[in-house]
Image (spheres, helix red, strand yellow):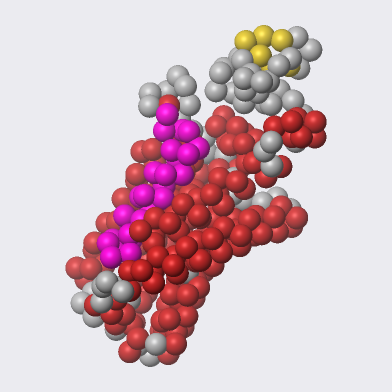
Amino acid sequence: MTDTDRGLWVSEPDGGAGPVDPDRPSWAGLAPMNQIQQQGSGLSETYWRAENAALLRRGGQKWGLPAAALVLGVNLVGFVLLGLAVNSQNSALSVVGIMIPSLLAAGLAVAISRTRGNGPVVDFGLPRSSAEFLGHVRSGLAWGGVAVVGGVLLALMLFSSIDVDEQAPLGNFADSAMGWKILLVVWIWIGAPICEETMFRGMLWGALEKRTRPMPMAWLGNRWVVLAITAVVFAIWHREWWRFVILLWGGLAIGIARMRSGSIVASTTAHSLNNTLPALVILLA
């Protein structure tokens, strides 16, 4: 057997060899996490685990880009309706209203995974053990740190050229009652990362990742294309053009956590860490 070309030939269960789908990884016929294979690949154990998880998802995943578009559409329509229904950003209704569209969209994503896919554990790469969970968290913290450091440097450059107080969409919440501010801070730090990662690095990522030959536009399934598309959509979705570059940087770092771990737990952890500074600003304002 040779896998130097990411193998058109792999070892079959009966010991023979034969041509297989060129999109099937060369290691797919081997025992998971084969140590010799890892040593010769130049790629980390985390990478192989994520690749194996992606391979396992495809067979039972009957949802794709239409389902991802539906989830994002529910989120977008919810925010549009919120803008029409709520006039004051200082009201309790507005704080709760900010949460509802993302909660509905994330709930829909989970429902689609349960009914049309493998379930959230497989489709979204949720950990099956405490050791796996801790590994995802470590990856998320590392790439979340990259997002924070790069975001701070980019923000310092932006602050010198724009009036941030006039641009910040949550700036008016500084005058809200402390209880509502705390609820908003918890949402920004924990709730929003969970919901948004389920939407973007769960549904959208999975829908793109599923596209392999002979499907049309199979290039969308390339991991780097998936990373770029999800980061751009993530940045656009926030509709804060003054910090688009910061959001794009954060989306790329958070996405790498997802790509390397195969799990939205890692990307949620990175996202949460990235949101810590904005949450603290609102709490202390």
User: Residue 67, percent across and down?
Assistant: 39, 41
Q: Can you say which quadrant of the picture contains the N terminus?
A: top right
Q: Is residue 222 within the magenta segment?
A: yes
Is residue 257 shown left or right of residue 241?
Answer: right
Please indicate, yes or no, whether residue 55 appears anywhere in the rendered image.
yes
User: Residue 144, percent across and down?
Assistant: 55, 62
> Residue drawn 74% across and 31% down?
40
User: Residue 255, percent across and down?
Assistant: 50, 50
> Residue drawn 33% across and 64% down?
243
> Residue drawn 59% across and 23% down?
24
> Residue drawn 37% across and 74% down?
96
Please indicate, yes or no, whether residue 207 appears anywhere in the rendered image.
no
Q: Is residue 22 within the magenta segment?
A: no
Over which residues does the magenta segment extend? 219-244
User: Residue 73, percent across and down?
Assistant: 31, 50
Q: How would you classify the magenta stretch by its main secondary structure?
A: helix
In depth, the one of 64 and 197 nearer the eye is: 197
Q: Is residue 188 above or below residue 172?
A: above
Q: Can you say which quadrant of the picture contains the C terminus?
A: bottom left
Is residue 270 shown left or right of residue 3?
Answer: left
